[in-house]
Amino acid sequence: MQHILAVESSCDETAASVMCYDGTFNVKSNIIASQIDIHKVYGGVVPEIASRKHIECISQVVEQAVDKAGVSLKDIDAVAVTYAPGLVGALLVGVNYAKSLAYALKKPLVAVHHIEAHIAANYIESPRLKPPFICLVASGGHCTIALAKSYTEYTALARTRDDAPGEAFDKIAKALDLGYPGGPAIEQAAKKGDSAAFKFPQVTFNDSFDFSFSGVKTAVINTLHKYRQKNEQIPISDIAASFQYAVCEVLSKRLCECAQHFDIKNIALAGGVASNSLLRQMIEDGAKAEGLNFYCPKPLHCTDNAAMTAIRGFYDHLLKRYAGNDLNAVATREIGTLI
Ligand code: KG4
Ligand code: ZN
């Protein structure tokens, strides 16, 4: 039996998890200290505050993860940590903590790519899912269609050319005064709205499966300006529903088209935006229509957590692919790049 302790601090969640492997994976603990209430006041994540909060609570979060797992630190076989991509000041807190812990415990250190961890979250609930498959990772900072060639090898097939979908959800929610984080707020407001009330743009490219969300963002903001200029009441729910529809439709269509193009039968979804029920439903429907198998983690494993870091890290641990004690944090790094 093997135990891996993972630490995640790439954005505004300080998270730690203990994962046990005895032929199958078992999440023994998955502790998440969210900073949402702190950043809410500013309408988005303030990087320096995020770093400071990680510093304050990382020790307690790791202690809780170890206690809840019912293990002691000497039972840990490897320490995994998110090293890229993300807010560099936030990443540094987790990286430095994990390095010190691995050094003190005399255990190996595994460096985990955050986007690959989001993809690996699918293995937690779906051990049947095996590479090769393609996965759409849609989050606050990223939008990638990745090909999982094996449990440790990933390549990006498409990416956003500007904003990430979660970022668009957050900006539009702010413009509609719906609060932060925008995804759940827009999803809630959209429940009472008509998704056909407005036709917002869905940008695609002929030469790739890339995405672009700056156009839909601008179109929604322009619509709001027109209502405000005329002093007319803004149909918040209709705008939220139409915006959500435009983003989810382009994401789900592109994922299914990409699977057909590369002749891949298994598709998966990951990242914070993957918690969106319309997106999950649209991809499920698209997959059914095209005869594809669709996998998606439960919402708790879609938004940032360390269980996904543990499971991704575990596959490198099995291959004894370890990081040196000179590991650094990296703000921007494409998936599949070796450290
Ligand atoms: O993966 P994540 O927790 O952090 C990043 O790595 O970025 O994703 C956070 C993003 C935020 O932009 C948030 O608004 C979005 O995921 N999100 C959602 C939903 N829940 C969270 N977007 C749409 N619908 C949701 N239900
Ligand atoms: Zn994330």
Image: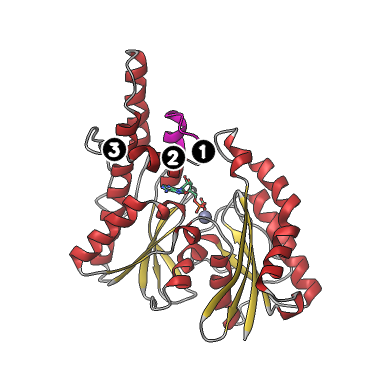
Q: Residue at position x 73%, y 53% from top?
A: 57
**Type of the residue with mark 1:** Tyr
Disc 3 vs disc 2: Cβ atoms closer than 8 Å?
A: no
Please name the colour scheme applied to the rendered image: secondary structure
Residue 271 screen position, x and y as percent: 46, 56
User: In the image, is residue 131 part of the stretch drawn in magenta?
Assistant: no
**Type of the residue with mark 2:** Ala
Choose the circle earlier in sequence order: 3 or 2: 2
Q: Residue at position x 34%, y 49% from top?
A: 211
Whether residue 208 can be seen here: no
The label number, if any, that marks residue 185 in the structure image: 2
User: Which corner quadrant of the image does residue 65 belong to?
Assistant: bottom right
For the C terminus, the quadrant is: bottom right
User: Which corner quadrant of the image does residue 41 belong to?
Assistant: top right
C-alpha separation, residue under disc 1 versus residue under disc 2: 7 Å
Looking at the picture, does residue 109 appear above or below residue 206? below
What's drawn in magenta, residue-wise?
A: 170-180
Q: Residue furthest top?
A: 230
Disc 1 vs disc 2: Cβ atoms closer than 8 Å?
A: yes
Residue 249 screen position, x and y as percent: 27, 49
Tell which of 244 and 142 is nearer to you: 244
